Amino acid sequence: MRFCYLLSGLAMASLAFGAQPAPAEVQLHFPAISKHYNLRILNNPVGGTFSQGTTIDERGQIAGLGTLPGDTVMHAVLWRSKNHALDLGTLGGPNSAVAWPNKNEQGVIAGISETADDNPLGETWSCAAAMFFLAPPTGKICQGFRWKNGSMQALPPLDGGYNSFATGINNAGAVVGWAENGVHEPTCNAPQVLQFEAVVWEPNGTVRQLQPWDGDLDGAATAINDNGQVVGISGICSNAVGGASARNMLLWDKHKTINLGSLGGQYWNTPMDINQVGNVTGFSDLAGDSVDHPNFSAFFWSKKSGLLNLHTLPGDSIAEGLGINNLDQVVGVSYPSAHGFIWQKGKDLVDLNSLVSPDSPYVVVAAQEINDRGVITGQAQDKNTGAYVSFEATPH
């Protein structure tokens, strides 16, 4: 589910990673935002001119996506080190991607992939609209995957459905996302036909549905932490992408469903990531919005602070919080400048381009995720060639 070009996304690695996220009760030191970042560009192992880092673990291993030559097909990619990048393959169809921040340090990755099978209902589904946007829709069924030990396993839809979409994963191996069922819902906009709901794919293979907010028909989960707290959206079917599908922002916490509220708007209200202490970032519309005219700002939410409007970079009109670490540092993207930012409590958004060398031949266009060492991954653009490349930005 990509809400404009907006929602970028990516994930993480293979191999045992070692370092575990800090538990909620540990008091963490809150460092100041670095005054300078070293920007390292990651080579695209599948050969195209478009790639993105979506998620980064504590060892600096990065997962995301890269296009093949011609830039009309993309594969999920894992950057294990400076000189070791891996094509994660697909579920049999042309495209795959790691599309959302992951919270797993055990070498298990959640993502999405097309299969070899045609969708009998002709739906383009969230995958085509959200991630596989560089070429006309293929008409293939799209399903979430769990990647482990070099093998990609499909995550099934609910009974009667065809499509599923995996976003986040925690250290227990529980994967969240959304999945179609067999209900032909009248609130769907063609070519979408079937209802979809927020789900958790448990490590034992079972699929657990999360209920939407009262009065809503559809839902989607976007992130999960080690306490089993899940964030996501609920609304109507619509296009199965943003808009009215994202009327309510929810936190599913054990047996409670908490509505996170909004910044005043009715649509495009989307939590993107949750850290191990249960604090959340994302984006939410302001008053005066409509489905076709989003006006969202980035936000930070905690039980203590409630929903905080992080606003945008100066001169911009919309912004998204995309990733949050256990130190409550938030990264994201602001538009129309298309510049990545970093935020910390008590501070305004800071343009990452002001923190890298002014001689850099790259513009940081989106900051996707940040780990607890303050290392950021995302997407940059080559000023000379126009190519979009994945990066690692290390503070010093």
Image (cartoon, rainbow, N blue to C red):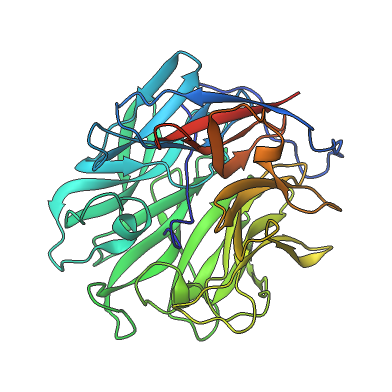
Q: 45 and 196: which one is in front?
A: 45
Residue at horizontal 57 percent and vertical 28 percent from the top: 392
- Residue most toward the top? 83
Residue at horizontal 50 percent and vertical 82 percent from the top: 290
**With respect to residue 73, does 316 lie above or below?**
below
**With respect to residue 290, does 127 lie above or below?**
above
**With respect to residue 206, does 236 lie above or below?**
below
Q: How many marks?
A: 0
Q: Is residue 375 left or right of residue 9?
A: right
Name the quarter where the C terminus is drawn: top right
Residue 375: x and y, percent? 66, 30
**Residue 323 in view:** no
**With respect to residue 298, does 374 lie above or below?**
above
Q: 7 and 301: which one is in front?
A: 7
Residue 309: x and y, percent? 73, 66
Q: Is residue 87 left or right of residue 78?
A: left
Q: Is residue 352 left or right of residue 291?
A: right
Q: 44 and 163: which one is in front?
A: 44
Q: Is residue 59 left or right of residue 244?
A: right
Q: Residue 19, located in which quarter of the rendered image?
A: top right
Residue at horizontal 50 percent and vertical 16 percent from the top: 82
**Residue 219 in view:** yes
Residue 9: x and y, percent? 47, 46
Residue 219: x and y, percent? 46, 70
Q: Residue 342, located in which quarter of the rendered image?
A: top right
Q: 305 and 138: which one is in front?
A: 138
Name the quarter where the N terminus is drawn: bottom left
Q: Residue 253, located in which quarter of the rendered image?
A: bottom right
